[in-house]
Image (tube, helix red, strand yellow):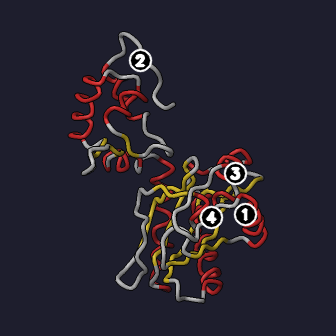
């Protein structure tokens, strides 16, 4: 369980951090009582700290009374060297892809069992999507997520395939089929989805590889989302690959990726 148990003499700071640590990929939205239990914080103390954290912007209170991570923490997270460098380096390439296709372009990194969307460019002609900058979506149900999952450690793949969630009726949740898809992604170098995260959309994505010494790592995934009536996904792969190579070369020269 996230957060840890109650302990006498904990400072206000440690209690606040325990409350934030109560949230994770399996529990992105929590009620007051759930936060108190998961963080090991007395209910009255949790209520007071939640009011302060919400007022500052670290948390946000939903209409149903539950809490979720607030925009302020995301904004601060973007200042972390890796995130900051990645967005600054990749943004011009994403803009090039969007200009050429007019479709929604995503850049994502793996965050545990989720794809964390660090940048997105879309326009009036782009297909509606559920993702936003800062969204965390399932690895197995998105194009960028499948690219990231295909390069993830075996234990991450095993955990995702142990209990894949269903976002739509088209989401692939059969572990055997998902394993075959990941093998195919590694073989051909790109992934695709068909209405697996949201109805009416298709996606295609490629890895952003960075040379690090004698090895190559997948630092991110670059993807495009298009309306489901489109049949030109394979045509978009070379466009993405050119941009991904450009991002990878640029990242290789930045200090945080060396």
Q: Earlier in the sequence, mark 1 or mark 4?
A: 1
| Residue that carries the numbered disc 2 in the rendered image | 6
* Residue 102 placement (x, y as % from top left): 44, 84
Q: Earlier in the sequence, mark 4 or mark 3?
A: 3
Please, is residue 217 above or below residue 189 in the view?
Answer: above
Residue 104, how many percent across, how many down? 45, 76
Q: Earlier in the sequence, mark 3 or mark 2?
A: 2
- Number of marks in the rendered image: 4
Q: Residues within 10 Å of mark 4 (few under 14, many from 20)?
A: many
- Left or right relative to 200: residue 158: right
User: Around disc 2, counting alpha carbons within 10 Å, would you say few (fewer than 14), some (14 to 19), or many (20 or more)?
Assistant: some
C-alpha gap between disc 4 and disc 3: 19 Å
The residues tagged by marks 3 and 1 sit, at their Cα atoms, a distance apart of 9 Å
Which residue occupies 47% across, 24% down?
A: 4
Mark 3 and mark 1 in contact? Answer it, CB < 8 Å: yes
Q: Is residue 236 left or right of residue 35?
A: right
Q: Which residue is mark 3?
A: 157
Q: Quadrant of residue 189?
A: bottom right
Quarter residue 88 falls in: bottom left
Q: Which mark is residue 42?
A: none
Q: Earlier in the sequence, mark 1 or mark 2?
A: 2
Q: Position of residue 115 (x, y in %)?
A: 54, 57
> Which of the two discs, 3 and 1, labels the residue nearer the N terminus?
3
Compare residues 171 and 139 and report the one nearer the observer.
171
As measured in the structure, the alpha-carbon distance from the residue carrying label 3 to the one carrying label 2 is: 33 Å
State if disc 3 and disc 4 touch (CB < 8 Å): no
Label 4 vs label 3, nearer the camera? 3
Is 82 in front, or is 21? 21
The vertical placement of 65 against 192, above or below, is above
Residue 208: mark in rendering:
4
Task: Give the alpha-carbon distance from disc 2 to disc 4, as whole Å.
Answer: 43 Å
What residue did someone put label 1 on? Answer: 182
């Amino acid at each position: 369980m996230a957060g840890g148990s109650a302990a006498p003499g904990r400072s206000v700071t440690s209690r606040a951090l325990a409350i934030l640590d109560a949230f994770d990929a399996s529990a992105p939205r929590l009620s007051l009582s759930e936060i108190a239990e998961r963080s090991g914080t007395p209910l009255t103390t949790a209520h007071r700290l939640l009011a302060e954290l919400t007022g500052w912007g670290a948390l946000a209170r939903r209409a149903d009374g539950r809490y979720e991570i607030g925009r302020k923490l995301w904004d601060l997270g973007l200042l972390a060297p890796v995130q900051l460098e990645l967005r600054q380096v990749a943004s011009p390439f994403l803009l090039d892809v969007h200009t050429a296709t007019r479709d929604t372009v995503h850049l994502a990194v793996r965050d545990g069992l989720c794809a964390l969307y660090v940048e997105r460019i879309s326009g009036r002609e782009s297909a509606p999507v559920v993702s936003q900058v800062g969204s965390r979506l399932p690895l197995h149900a998105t194009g960028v997520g499948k690219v990231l999952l295909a390069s993830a450690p075996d234990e991450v793949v095993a955990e995702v395939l142990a209990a894949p969630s269903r976002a739509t009726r088209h989401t692939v949740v059969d572990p055997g089929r998902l394993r075959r898809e990941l093998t195919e992604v590694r073989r051909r170098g790109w992934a695709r989805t068909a209405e697996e995260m949201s109805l009416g959309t298709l996606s295609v994505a490629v890895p952003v590889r960075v040379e690090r010494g004698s090895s190559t790592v997948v630092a991110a995934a670059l993807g495009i989302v298009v309306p489901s009536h489109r049949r030109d996904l394979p045509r978009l792969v070379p466009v993405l690959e050119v941009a991904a190579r450009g991002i990878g070369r640029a990242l290789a020269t930045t200090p945080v990726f060396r």
